[in-house]
Image: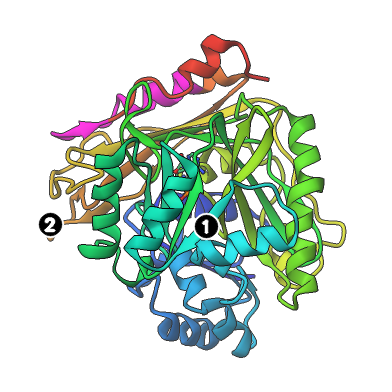
């Protein structure tokens, strides 16, 4: 099979790594890819959101399956364009991608299908937003309706912070038209966990559990990032509870989408808060989590390609995901300044480490300088990943790999997984 992976981050590197091990694979393409992906796939300098160019590339090359990594091309209709060109695609069409692309679409969908989520109101002006916020008390959660690169959620704790948040959303227009409408919702308390599954439009197959760490600072402090590390199992949701959520929640979403005339094919990711009153959906994503995808790829026991190809064809048939018994971890190596303005351009040393079968060093924000050296090009730069018999072993091996790579200004959290290990809640 000829397979195209769209994207160029650590998530896509891990997808390429897994797909490249498939006996079904003929040719692996990646657009735009990165210097790490170059070693295992043929990369093309087409931006991940250039829907027209990607669709014509897939048609010209006779690509048998396109796997879309990031959400933006999905919300722009890449899957629809590929389908129109007769090219199979693993990823939802534009309408279904609104589960991630519009928080209001997602909340209204959850209301229609009785899916548990935080109570909310929708506001179109600063006055409406202020009124809605007063109903919920502090802290209160404000979410820009549209995509905001993971930064569109604000959680003011008092009147002063609320006024700052309202001003950022409605006056400064920091999130542009993404905040034309804003969701105001109750703040939930509990442990967060990601539930990730693939769907063929009719059925879901859940990945084993994973947890990511969103704050930049140790002890879960400082601003939110895309994720500074992840591990699987999650340690906070056991497999039995996850299986129940697969049936009671993910399958309900799928059935709802199909009933509304928009079958959902691709990755369905529910970000959950495990509250004292039970699990509540914080958000849906329509793609693999980054960095949750990376440890999940390490834990996948069988072949991923036939499962994704069957999903794209609309029927899993006999294809099933299977997982290793052990654990896997991912430590994100970021550049100083992230998640604000990360420093760029430093040359990275130590990339030639021998990763073997149980570890992987995935590239995220890297590029090649004119003289061919691999240099820092983004906030999250590399992902040091490892698997082990249990979480402690996987984390130790991932940190050992993380410490073998260097550049001036490398930043990482030393406490990924620590609370789960100390709490003794890991499965
Ligand atoms: P989202 O993009 O909706 O997942 O929001 C990003 C982050 O904001 C989540 O991972 C949570 O940490 C936090 N968050 C979102 N909604 C809520 C809520 N209703 N209560 C508490 N925290 C929330
Ligand atoms: N790691 C969180 C996300 O991919 O949305």
**Image quadrant where one finds the N terminus:** bottom right
Residue placed at 65% from the left, 36% from the top? 209
Q: Is residue 279 above or below residue 14?
A: above
Image position of 393 (left or right of 301):
left
**Looking at the rendered structure, which numbered label has been put on residue 121?**
1
- Give the total of numbered labels: 2
Image position of 14 (left or right of 193):
left
Front-most of 7 and 30?
7
On whether residue 409 falls in the magenta region, the answer is yes
- Give the distance between the C-alpha atoms of the residues marked 2 and 1, in whole angstroms: 54 Å
State the image coordinates of residue 228 (x, y, percent, origin top left): 38, 36
Residue placed at 71% from the left, 75% from the top? 262
- In this rendering, does residue 291 appear at all? yes
| Residue extent of the magenta highlight | 395-411
| Residue at numbered disc 2 | 371
**Looking at the rendered structure, which numbered label has been put on residue 78?**
none
> Mark 1, residues whose alpha carbon is within 10 Å: few (<14), some, or many (≥20)?
many
Residue placed at 68% from the left, 59% from the top? 111
> Mark 2, residues whose alpha carbon is within 10 Å: few (<14), some, or many (≥20)?
few
- Give the quadrant of residue 156: top left
State the image coordinates of residue 253 (x, y, percent, origin top left): 73, 59
């Amino acid at each position: 099979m000829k397979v195209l992976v769209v994207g160029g981050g650590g998530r896509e590197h891990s997808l390429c790594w897994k797909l490249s091990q498939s006996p079904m694979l003929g040719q692996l393409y990646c657009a735009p890819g990165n210097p790490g992906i170059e070693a295992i796939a043929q990369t093309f300098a087409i931006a991940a959101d250039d829907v027209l160019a990607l669709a014509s590339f897939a048609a010209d090359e006779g690509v048998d399956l396109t796997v879309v990594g990031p959400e933006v091309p999905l919300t722009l209709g890449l899957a629809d364009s590929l389908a129109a060109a007769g090219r199979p695609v693993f990823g939802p069409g534009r309408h279904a991608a609104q589960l991630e692309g519009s928080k209001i679409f997602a909340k209204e969908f959850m209301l229609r299908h009785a899916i548990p989520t935080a109570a909310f109101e929708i506001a179109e002006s600063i006055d409406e937003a202020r009124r809605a916020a007063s109903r919920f008390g502090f802290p209160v959660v404000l979410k820009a309706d549209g995509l905001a690169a993971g930064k569109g959620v604000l959680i003011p704790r008092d009147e002063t912070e609320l006024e700052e948040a309202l001003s950022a959303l409605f006056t400064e227009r920091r999130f542009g038209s993404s905040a034309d409408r804003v969701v105001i919702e109750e703040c939930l308390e509990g442990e967060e966990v990601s539930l990730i599954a693939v769907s063929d439009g009719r059925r879901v197959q859940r990945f084993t559990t994973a947890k990511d760490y969103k704050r930049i600072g140790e002890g879960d402090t400082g601003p939110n990032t895309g994720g500074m590390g992840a591990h699987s199992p999650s340690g906070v949701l056991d497999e039995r509870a996850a299986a129940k959520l697969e049936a009671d929640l993910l399958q309900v979403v799928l059935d709802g989408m199909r009933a509304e005339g928009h079958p959902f094919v691709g990755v369905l990711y529910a970000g959950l808060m495990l509250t004292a009153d039970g699990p509540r959906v914080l958000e849906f994503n329509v793609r693999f989590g980054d960095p949750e995808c990376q440890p999940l790829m390490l834990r996948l026991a069988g072949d991923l390609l036939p499962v994704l190809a069957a999903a794209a064809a609309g029927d899993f048939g006999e294809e099933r995901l299977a997982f290793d018994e052990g654990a896997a971890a991912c430590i994100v190596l970021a550049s100083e300044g992230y998640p604000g303005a990360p420093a760029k351009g430093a040359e990275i040393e130590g990339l030639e480490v021998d990763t073997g079968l149980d570890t992987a060093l995935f590239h995220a924000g890297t590029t090649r300088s004119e003289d061919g050296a691999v240099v820092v090009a983004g906030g999250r730069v590399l992902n040091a990943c490892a698997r082990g018999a249990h979480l402690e072993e996987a984390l130790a091996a991932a940190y050992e790999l993380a410490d073998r790579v260097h550049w001036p200004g490398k930043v990482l959290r030393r406490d990924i997984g620590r609370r789960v290990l100390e709490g003794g809640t890991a499965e």
